[in-house]
Image: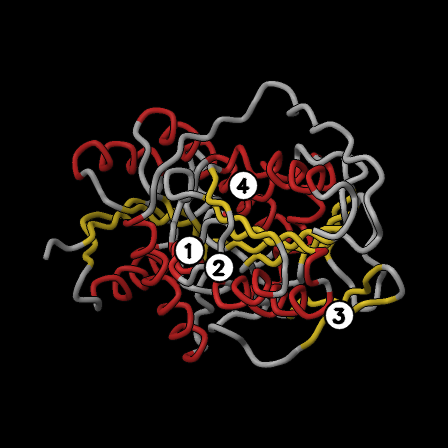
Amino acid sequence: MEKIKVLIVDDSALMRSLLGEIVNAEHDMAVVGTARDPVVARDLVRELSPDVITLDVEMPRMNGLEFLEKLMRLRPTPVVMISSLTQSGADATLRALELGAVDFVAKPRLGIADGVQQAAAEIVAKIRTAARSRMRRPERPAAPRRPLPSAGVVGAGKLVCIGASTGGTEAIREILEVFPQDCPGTLITLHMPAEFTKRFAQRLDGICRISVKEAEDGEPVLPGHAYVAPGGRHLAMRRSGQGYVTRLTDDAAVNRHRPSVDVLFAAAAREAGRDAIGVLLTGMGKDGARAMLEMREAGAWTIAQDEATSVVFGMPREAIALGAVHEVLPLGAIGAAVFARLGASGGAAL
């Protein structure tokens, strides 16, 4: 079996050494080169044709985002960002995902054995996923996308639930950008650390016509609003009159994730039943598949992103295999499908 060829780009010699040890310890991957800055990396990309690049943001001569933008335009290659857990690091990472990076991991915390071991496992898992991912050139429009037509009067009991993992930040953005201001209340679970979910929600809030925020415990789920699960906490909901109230918990991880899409979808099946629409987007693993089947069995309408537009087709594939999905659609058609379904239901139960 051919090993995954990895190029490490980081201005820290210590970090280059640590990442090299992590990668070379795996049987299925090897470091083919290292670079202290993007100018050196540019030549190595041409010379070595790496399968995956790990990339820092702050480096001399050319920052990582500038390098990434040029790389995706001229020679698209799967990139895993190595990100610092700071506000500026979160902003840069979200911009990198917009530019085409497949995923990101937090920088290993040197001197903390458990932290390095946990980071190592995450790094190699994401390199493997990146090597198998489907590269998509970023296609940001010159102007914001036109919203879908008004949904009409949407009953307070209507609910949209969205789950995603790898590649999900841009997929979620593309869907929410076309949501009209009177969309049903929308709950979102994305596999993302606590330091990033608030910035992600704020970024969407500045782009979309609907209001987007990081979810808080016990707040009403309002039409025209989307709520993003905070990193490290499960997001669910409970009925309250004709509507819903959010519920955050610190329960154990499900499918190795907290927040977990299964937790959100299971709550939607239980609390909303046929008033819910479930959407499962790009991501590795199987989180969300089992509970999407629960949603379908409870009468909800369920949609999965198709393979051609998924960065990683793992989660949608698992749901389809279980028979949990009514429609399999390209990303660009999902927003319209949600509102077509609302229209078909005539404002009544789905």
Q: Give the residue number, with chain letter if any, for mark 3.
A: 247
Residue at (34, 41) in percent of width and height: 134
CA–CA distance in space, label 3 to label 1: 28 Å
In depth, the one of 23 and 146 nearer the eye is 146
Label whose residue precedes the other's in the sequence (3 or 2): 3
What's the residue type where badge 3 is placed?
Arg
In depth, the one of 305 and 50 nearer the eye is 305
Which mark's residue is nearer the viewer, 2 or 4?
A: 2
Label whose residue precedes the other's in the sequence (3 or 1): 3
What's the residue type where badge 4 is placed?
Glu
Q: Give the residue number, with chain letter if any, for mark 4.
A: 170
Q: Position of residue 44 (x, y in %)?
A: 22, 37
Q: Give the residue number, with chain letter if any, for mark 2.
A: 324
Which mark's residue is nearer the viewer, 3 or 1?
A: 1
Find out whether the residues at labels 3 and 1 contact each other: C-beta distance under 8 Å.
no
CA–CA distance in space, label 1 to label 4: 22 Å
Residue at (75, 52) in percent of width and height: 349
Find out whether the residues at labels 2 and 1 contact each other: C-beta distance under 8 Å.
yes
Most extreme residue toward the right is 241
Report helix, strand or loop for mark 3.
strand
Residue at (77, 69) in percent of width and height: 238
Q: Give the residue number, with chain letter if any, for mark 1.
A: 320
CA–CA distance in space, label 2 to label 4: 24 Å
> Looking at the rendering, which quadrant does residue 150 occupy?
top right
What's the residue type where badge 2 is placed?
Ala
In this rendering, the count of numbered labels is: 4
Label placed on residue 233: none
Mark 4, Cα crowd under 10 Å, few <14 / some 14-19 / many 20+, is some
Report helix, strand or loop for mark 2.
loop
Label whose residue precedes the other's in the sequence (1 or 4): 4
